[in-house]
Every structure is written in structure tokens, then in C-alpha cells.
Amino acid sequence: VQLCAMKHYPELAKVVSFLDCWNKNWQQIPSGWESCAASNGMDKGKLSACADGAEGKDLLRESMKKAQAANAQGSPTILVGGAPYEGGREKNDFLRAICGKITGAKPASCAKIPEDIEVAAIILTDKRCKFCQTAGLEANLKSRFFPKLKTKTLDYGDPEGKALYKEMGIQHLPYMLFPPGVEKAERYARIAQWMQEKGKYKQLKIPA
């Protein structure tokens, strides 16, 4: 149905409005599209005939080929300049990625993208703890929230690590602190609910 809508109604705004309407009650998919088609000026009969007939099967088969060629493993799978995109999902994240792939003269919009600030973080862990690895967490934070994340890892077994453990009254590891200024990061609002005040720092609430 979606592929038929995109083919017969190529106006992007109309298709997006149709999909947004349908996705509001995603639990009922694949049913429930007819009212959304009607509210967006789409011919329900035309879409139904396409989806149920040979045309729909051909569109689905061609779409599957494109997905396989792109090695799509999930939805959405995004390629920028032919390469997998693993950045954030905000407008400026996509603009930075696209502008970075443009060779030669860039459009004026590329010059208007605000720069991401560098975000520092202190991680306190214990090398004896096999469950305290934070590499995955760091990668997730960098891709989704802080593209310019710089981390300093301290170990509980070292004097500096023990001093921080005592100073902050820490009860469990691993522990992650962000110095003042992290609030200025472009995507901070998206992670603010997992931050809590800890002296002059912001502590990321992560499992012990």
C-alpha cells in the first residue's frame, strides 16, 4: 500500500501525511489505511487495486531488491553518499553528513549549520569487573547525543580513581560524569532525563 501510494501520488508532502496518519495507530497495520488515504485526497480504489494486484507485487519485489542491494538490516537503514549513516537523527545531523559528502562548491545551507561542541566525560570503572565495560555505551552516546564526545577513563584501583570514588560518594560502578557546560550540547535535551545533579557535575544514570 505504501509503495502504491508513493508511485501514484509522488508529491512527498502528501505521502508523508498519509504515512503519519496511518502510523498513529500502528498496532492495527496493515488495516486502517483507507481513512488516511481519504483524508489526504488519495483514491482508495486505485490504491487497493494496485496493492492487491500484479502492480503491487512488482513494486514490492523491486523494493526488496533495493533493500538487499543496500544490505538493509533494519528500518530505517540510511545511506549517505553510498555509505552507511550512523549519526544522529536531528535535522542538523543529516545536514552535516550530507554536506560532508559534497565535493566542490557547497550550498549556502551548509555554512549555516551550527558546530557541535566538544563534550568531555569522566568514566570511573574497575578493570577487574568484566561487566563494567563501557565501550558500547560510549559509542551509543557518540552516535546519538554527543558526536564530539571525549572520555577520560579512571580505574578504581588507581589513586585518582579512588579519590574520585570517595569525593563523589559513589556506591557502584561504572560511573559517568559530565563537567559543567554539557547542557550546551545540541542534543542535550534528549538525554537530560537520564542525567542527575552530582555536585558540579551531571551524572549519567546507568546500571551498576
Image: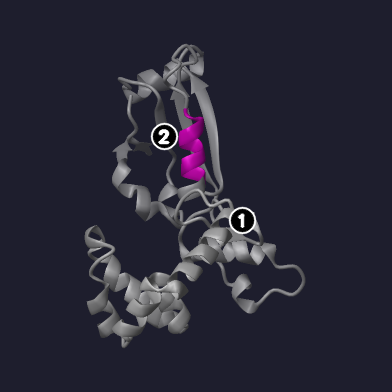
- 60 versus 200 height, above or below: below
Is 131 positioned to the left or the right of 63 in the image? Answer: left
Tell me which residue sits at (57%, 61%) in the image.
66
Work out whether residue 110 or residue 60 is closer to the camera in this orientation and state it: 60
Is 157 positioned to the left or the right of 21 in the image? Answer: right
Stretch of the chain drawn in magenta:
134-142
Query: Which residue is disc 2 drawn over?
Result: 177
- 163 versus 38 height, above or below: above
Is 136 positioned to the left or the right of 65 in the image? Answer: left
Query: Which residue is disc 1 drawn over?
Result: 69
Q: Distance between the residues labelled 1 and 2?
A: 42 Å
Q: Which amino acid does label 1 sit on?
A: Ala
Between discs 1 and 2, the one toward the N terminus: 1
Secondary element type, mark 1: helix
Residues packed near mark 2 inside 10 Å, few (<14), some (14 to 19) or many (20 plus): many
Magenta span main SS: helix
- 11 versus 181 height, above or below: below
Q: Which amino acid does label 2 sit on?
A: Leu
| Percent x, y of residue 103 | 75, 68
Tell me if residue 138 is in the magenta stretch.
Answer: yes
The quarter of the picture where the N terminus appears is: bottom left
Residue at the right extreme, as displayed? 104
| Percent x, y of residue 87 | 53, 53
